[in-house]
Image (cartoon, coloured by chain):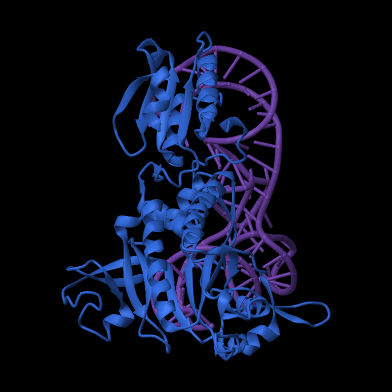
Chain colours: A blue, B purple
RNA sequence: CGGGGCAUCGUAUAUUGGUAGUACGCUUGGUUUGGGACCAUGUAGGCUGAGUUCGAUUCUCAGUGCCCCGACCA
């Protein structure tokens, strides 16, 4: 992508009503735009990051047998009345059409997937079954805040699993848990994301959250010093020992909840009477698990965690581009041609390049590169050519090195 | 939902009960080119409604919006 053609430009100033680090940096760099409180547009750079995150999640979901689907965001009222959540859930957006028909904007999809599965699955032979989607959710947050961390409209991956018995649910739950660990490792948050015991509601003792350490977090978690699994505030009040290893020495830290997984058992299959025939021809109620993970919140979390005073520092796996190619030219030099050649070369190698071909000062290009936070910065200038090539600098490092143009591709892959 | 704060060109800000100014951005022309360069040029603004007043962007009230603290958050 040529930066001269990129839809958004960076700003020098941040809107004064933004305080959170992720909102400030993402808006300043032109990744997102705020339409209203907790409602954002994803602009070209931001959308690329969001999609990278989504694709990492997809890959892992597919690995554990999830089939991707896409359910509607508009939900007829009667489905929500069946579970009692039309009145119970106070952050449900409710709308009415001209005929007076009432609908909800989906905040989660148990009410939709259960009837859907009921319609297509009648036999134990089709169970277990796993389906997931990545979709926009709506929740009427009374106080949305902190940029992408708590929105009223946000992206969410929700996986639902269907089982014949609890043992099968348990087994799959463990698989899903592991797949979440893989996801956070791949996204670059692995080391600071703790598996966290949370309340299991009325049907199981525990559920699990995935909590990423950050001062911007709303949650307080208690990390077991022995096994580094954490427990949340709620659980901390109920137990003195780590449910994982029995340790009793904890460290308190603030964290952002980036994922949660629940054993729903028959909480939703029962009200909808979701049953299949077993081997004996008897009807059995299916039991369920659900597994949530918010790509947009993850994106905000990454920014909160990886930044410095100059801007964002994207992990390679989710960066909008791998290389920020910068040309520094003067009127007499042939830099333009050199930079063009390198741009084409890198692209033909399948490397994602943001090419700063704009006619502005070097300082401004460097400042933008630091702000946008692409992992590799490659500078082409008279100075670099004179000493044999291009200058390569990693965003998270102070030093740069001269690399021969012919060796550039191997250097950055 | 309780409490607090804020509202002026696209962005950030200043001033004022009497012609609203500056910087950045953007236009055009020129000089520049290794850490947000310079000269010239043009561009655009008082959240909405009511009240007080000869006159309101400024004072009062209401509304709306945004931010923060708290509560809430399968």
Q: Residue furthest top?
A: A332
Residue B60 vs A350, above or below: the answer is below
Residue A352 vs A135, above or below: the answer is above
Q: Residue furthest right?
A: A99
Q: Nearer the viewer, residue A234 or A121?
A: A121
Q: Residue at x 37, y 51 (%)?
A: A188
Residue A407 vs A69, above or below: the answer is above
Q: Nearer the viewer, residue A312 or A290?
A: A290
Give the image quarter of residue A226.
bottom left
Q: Quadrant of the C terminus of chain A?
A: top left
Q: Nearer the viewer, residue A350 or A302?
A: A350
Query: Measured from the top left, where is residue A238 in percent x and y?
Result: 27, 86
* Left or right for B27, reference A271: right
Give the image quarter of residue B70.
bottom left
Query: Measured from the top left, where is residue A387 in percent x and y?
Result: 35, 12
Q: Quadrant of the N terminus of chain A?
A: top right
Query: Measured from the top left, where is residue A172 in percent x and y?
Result: 42, 72
Query: Measured from the top left, where is residue A345 in percent x and y?
Result: 52, 23
């Amino acid at each position: 992508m040529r930066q001269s053609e990129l839809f958004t430009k960076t700003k020098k100033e941040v809107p004064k009503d933004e305080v959170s680090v992720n909102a400030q940096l993402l808006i300043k760099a032109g990744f997102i735009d705020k339409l209203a409180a907790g409602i954002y547009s994803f602009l070209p750079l931001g959308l690329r990051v969001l999609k990278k995150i989504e694709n990492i999640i997809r890959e892992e979901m597919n690995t554990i047998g999830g089939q991707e689907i896409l359910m509607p965001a508009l939900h007829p009222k009667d489905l929500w009345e069946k579970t009692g959540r039309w009145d119970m859930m106070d952050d449900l957006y409710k709308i009415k059409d001209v005929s007076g028909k009432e609908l909800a904007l989906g905040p989660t999809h148990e009410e939709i997937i259960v009837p859907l599965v009921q319609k297509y699955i009648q036999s134990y032979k089709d169970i277990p079954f796993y389906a997931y989607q990545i979709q926009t959710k709506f929740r009427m947050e009374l106080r949305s805040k902190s940029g992408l961390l708590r929105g009223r409209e946000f992206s969410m991956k929700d996986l639902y699993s269907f089982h014949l018995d609890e043992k099968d649910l348990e087994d799959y739950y463990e698989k899903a848990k592991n797949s979440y660990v893989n996801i956070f490792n791949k996204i670059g948050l692995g080391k600071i994301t703790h598996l966290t015991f949370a309340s299991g509601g009325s049907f199981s003792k525990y559920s699990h959250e995935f909590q990423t350490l950050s001062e911007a977090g709303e949650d307080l978690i208690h990390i077991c010093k022995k096994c580094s699994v954490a427990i949340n505030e709620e659980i901390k009040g109920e137990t003195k020992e780590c449910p994982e290893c029995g340790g009793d020495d904890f460290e308190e830290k603030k964290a952002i909840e980036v994922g949660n997984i629940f054993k729903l058992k028959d909480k939703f299959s029962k009200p909808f009477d979701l049953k299949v025939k077993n081997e004996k021809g008897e009807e059995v109620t299916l039991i369920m698990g659900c597994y949530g993970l918010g790509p947009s919140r993850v994106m905000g979390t990454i920014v909160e965690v990886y930044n410095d005073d100059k801007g964002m520092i994207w992990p390679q796996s989710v960066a909008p581009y791998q290389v920020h190619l910068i040309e520094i030219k003067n009127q007499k030099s042939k830099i333009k041609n050199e930079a063009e050649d390198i741009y084409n070369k890198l692209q033909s190698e399948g490397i994602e390049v943001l090419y700063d071909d704009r006619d502005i000062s070097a300082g401004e290009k460097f400042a933008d590169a630091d702000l946008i936070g692409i992992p590799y910065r490659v500078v082409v200038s008279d100075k670099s050519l004179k000493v044999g090539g291009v200058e390569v600098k990693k965003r998270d490092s102070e030093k740069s090195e001269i690399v021969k143009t012919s060796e550039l591709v191997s250097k950055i892959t």
